[in-house]
Amino acid sequence: MSTISDVINDRNFVTLKNLHFRSLHLKLEGLNPAGSVKMKTAKWLIADLERRGSIGPDTVLIESSSGSLGVALSLICAERGYRFRCVVDPNTTAQNIKIMKAFGADVIVVDVRDENGGFLGTRIQYIKELVAQDSRFVWMNQYANPENPRAHANTTARAITESFEHIDYLFVGAGTTGTLMGCVQHFKTHRPQTHIIAVDSEGSVTFGGAAGKRYIPGLGTSRRPEIFNKEGIDSFQIVSEADTVAMCRYVARTNGVLAGGSTGTVLAAVYARRQELPENAVIVAISPDMGERYLDSVYDDEWVKARFGSSPLTGEAPVTSRSTSSPACDEREAAYV
């Protein structure tokens, strides 16, 4: 008999049109009960604790999340009768917070920015202090836990290689970098000829870029995750949030795909490479999320205009120069590697 967390649809691909490339395939990760790729991360993090006997009758699981993992963990904890506290920030969508609370999670919102101008450092500091004070709390730590990339090496990446005989380019977004690192682990062993292009948001520090204010949850960090390793990544692409918004809206109107913010960023990265990559290249892009939870932000005209002006509202694919390709990213990396 299956439970709700067993419903993971790992082989949903759609071919996108009107984005220059003839063979651009989008792997839809949002068609599971938790609504994002984080469903698999959550299952593996909790399963690891269960195997090690780390969840007792008084345990309160705790995690920092921009939203999607918090929803997935809330769902599984509700299914299994575990207590869960999620630490989020003001960028987390109201819909995600409401879903977590509906599953019975305790949600804490921190609103003090960290030294890089984001909230991740503040969220993590809150957890570290709480865990040190109260032994009931067990931190899963998606940013350093090897079960995060291991989940995607064994599910997400495997599902892709089993679905396509040949892939020229794989575009993967970087948040905690769990999906990215899992794909690197799997592809470098099973499909080393596939070029992996890592995608992040402008203002994130993961690839060595300058910290900046970000409004769209999902991709990007203000603190480099411990599990991140640039080895095995062939190229990097940084995308502005204005281009993310424009791409989300364009794909919705031209393909009927209501993309979430992370998905819009990944597709904007693909489109930014249209002059560099062959038009007939076989490309797979991972869509971490769907757009229903962004209706009051990315798809709301007033929200967009207040943060990015009117340029993302044209309904066209982004054609600005704000997307920064791999050479600039590599130069920034040289400063700290």
Image: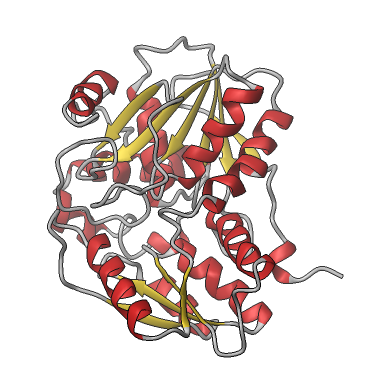
Q: Quadrant of residue 274?
A: top left
Relative to 201, does residue 86 appear above or below in the rendering? below
Colouring method of the image: secondary structure
Q: Name the residue at 67% across, 78% down.
A: 79
Q: Residue 21: image x %, image y %?
A: 49, 19
Task: Tell me the residue at 19%/58% (across/down).
Answer: 118
Image: 320 above or below 286: above
257 on left or right of 325: right
Left or right: residue 170 compared with residue 247: right
Residue 259, above or below 126: above
Horizontal side of 51 relative to 84 (left or right) equals: right
In the rendered image of this protein, does residue 53 appear above or below residue 201? below
Q: Nearer the viewer, residue 264 or 46?
A: 46
Question: Residue 181 at what x, y percent from top left?
Answer: 49, 38
User: Residue at the spot x=54%, y=84% of the render?
Assistant: 59
**Residue 182 visible within the image:** yes
Instruction: Say how many tags the image has.
Output: 0
Quadrant in the picture for the C terminus: top left
- Tell me if I can see residue 250 in this picture: no
- Give left or right: position of 37 versus 155: left
Q: Quadrant of residue 113?
A: bottom left
Residue 229: percent from left, percent from top: 39, 35
Residue at 41% x, 35% y is 267
Q: Residue furthest bottom?
A: 58
Provide residue 1's location: percent of width, then percent of height: 87, 70
